[in-house]
Amino acid sequence: MAPSDQIAAAEAVQLPFMAKFGLWLPASFVAAAGGGPAVDGRLRAAEQAFVNAPDITACAGTGPDAQAVAARSNLLPADVHDQRVVQVAGPTVFQIVDVIEIGTSKLEQLIKLQEQRAALDGPVDPLPSARSRPRAKPAGDDWVAKVMCKLLLRDVLGRHFWAIEQLPVGGVSVDMCLRTKIVVSGVTVARGVLFLKPTNAEMHFPAGDEPVRQRLDRTIARLATDVAGLRSGQ
């Protein structure tokens, strides 16, 4: 596809993509995603390629492309860590790169996941994927979850931010797929920390999610290392 055609194809999908993700896509990314001549096909292909991307920063491209993405996308302010409280209208998209459960100790989490992993070796797989696993439904904004998660988020520029579940967000768990994208809208940010609720966070799970056993093995290994470090005083 000629450069002029790439630009035309990208422009056709920018408005609906921006409305959903708050992200300006380089023309080269849209062209590489394919999707045929129709705008709807290109949009679906661009969305799928973005959600499936293993690293969100690769979607920004380099040079002028990256500069355009930084200038035109809905991103958190550069000084957001210095602001006491700010409301971010969004939509603003991040990739989840780590999830830490802060409602229970790491040892309790490790024991629970080891039990779940052992159960998977039986004749029936009793553990659904993280995104379908039911979680407690909040009774209102004043409801406090007994188990909360802290998430490390990365934006398209490679900057990292912490987020905390103010109320449980469906699909968030310590063994979830870390390629997952999360779009926030109308979110409160205090000193650079985002406070998540089901009403301000939307999850976008990649196709070909990690197998349950693989996710559990990865999480168990990380928790086991953390617990060993705590026991040794490191």
Image: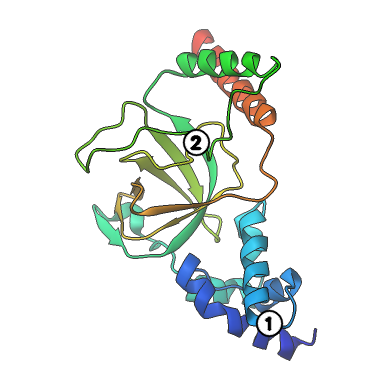
- Above or below, comparing residue 6 to residue 94 in the picture: below
Q: Is residue 224 left or right of residue 182?
A: right
Whole-percent x, y for residue 10 in the image: 63, 81
Q: Is residue 86 left or right of residue 91?
A: left
Whole-percent x, y for residue 51 in the image: 61, 57
Colour treatment of the image: rainbow
**Dividing the picture into quarters, in which one does residue 105 lie?**
top left
- Above or below, comparing residue 47 to residue 125 in the picture: below
Q: Is residue 24 left or right of residue 19?
A: right
Whole-percent x, y for residue 18 in the image: 49, 73
Measure the alpha-carbon separation of dots 2 and 1. 38 Å
Pick the front one: 63 or 176: 176
Residue 38's disc is 1
Q: Residue furthest right?
A: 1
Q: Is residue 139 visible?
A: yes
The mark nearer the N terminus, 2 or 1, is 1
Q: Which residue is mark 2?
A: 99
Residue displayed at 23% across by 36% down: 143
**Dividing the picture into quarters, in which one does residue 223 lie?**
top right
Which amino acid is tagged 2?
A: Val
